[in-house]
Image: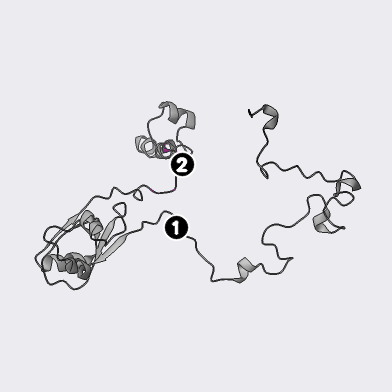
Amino acid sequence: MPLRLDDLRPNEGSNNRRKRVGRGEGSGHGKTAGRGTKGQNARSGGGTRPGFAGGQLPIQQALPYKRGFTNIYKTPWEVVSLERLQQLEADGPITPEFLYERGVTRGLEFPVKVLGGELTAPIVVAAHAFSGAARERITAAGGTVEVLERTDRWVSARPRSRRLPLNAELKDAGVGKVGGPSRAEAVAGQHASTPNQVAEEV
């Protein structure tokens, strides 16, 4: 049987009828319109803000150990100790790719940092960062240290500043200072000297 336009129906539950309140008792939402009988929440514009506890000390202020925040721009370093590197018994240089192949790190997108530990054999290590103790013990054991340039996405993962580069230039030009140029003059480049230069000329 061919499908016709009048056979089309939306999926069950995809469309819901709007709740129409205050349209008489027959609607099921008459009289108080679902707001109950009187009280603060029954008024127009009533209710309280989130976290309001009626005037007593709110719970978010009563829990002093809930402080700080989670830094979403924190770099998730892959930390490896010298003891772990020595256990690998690598024939060649130890690189982030080698560590990932041996299952030491989670992935190549994370920067690698080498920390201190016991080291008896010389090793060649290439990583993105080294602690001071790790660097000293590798060189003392006759190994070499190579610091790789970070190209991960957390290098530039910083909150965008609202300040425009132009604002810094205007500040250097002395806009708003006594004897300094106006904003229009500084933008147009008509006043190149700063207030300090003007004072020196006088």
Residue at 27% in and 50% down: 150
Please state which of residues 29 and 52 is positioned toward the viewer in this rendering: 29
| Residue bearing mark 1 | 71
Residue type at tag 1: Asn
87 vs 16, left or right, is left
Magenta residues, dominant SS class: loop
Q: CA distance from mark 1 to mark 2?
A: 21 Å
Splitting the image into 4 quarters, where does residue 50 fall?
bottom right
Which span is picked out in magenta? 157-165
Splitting the image into 4 quarters, where does residue 22 fall?
top right
Q: Considering the numbered disc 2 on the image, is that residue within a helix, a strand or a loop?
A: loop
| Residue bearing mark 2 | 163
Dot 1 or dot 2, earlier in sequence: 1
- The image quadrant where one finds the N terminus is top right
Q: Considering the numbered disc 1 on the image, is that residue within a helix, a strand or a loop?
A: loop
Classed neighbour count for the residue bearing mark 1: other residues with Cα under 10 Å, few (<14), some (14–19), many (≥20)? few
79 vs 23, left or right, is left
Residue at 61% in and 68% down: 61
Residue 136 in the image: x percent, y percent? 16, 67
Residue 158 in the image: x percent, y percent? 41, 49
Residue 88 in the image: x percent, y percent? 18, 66
183 w.r.t. 110: above or below? above
- The image quadrant where one finds the C terminus is top left
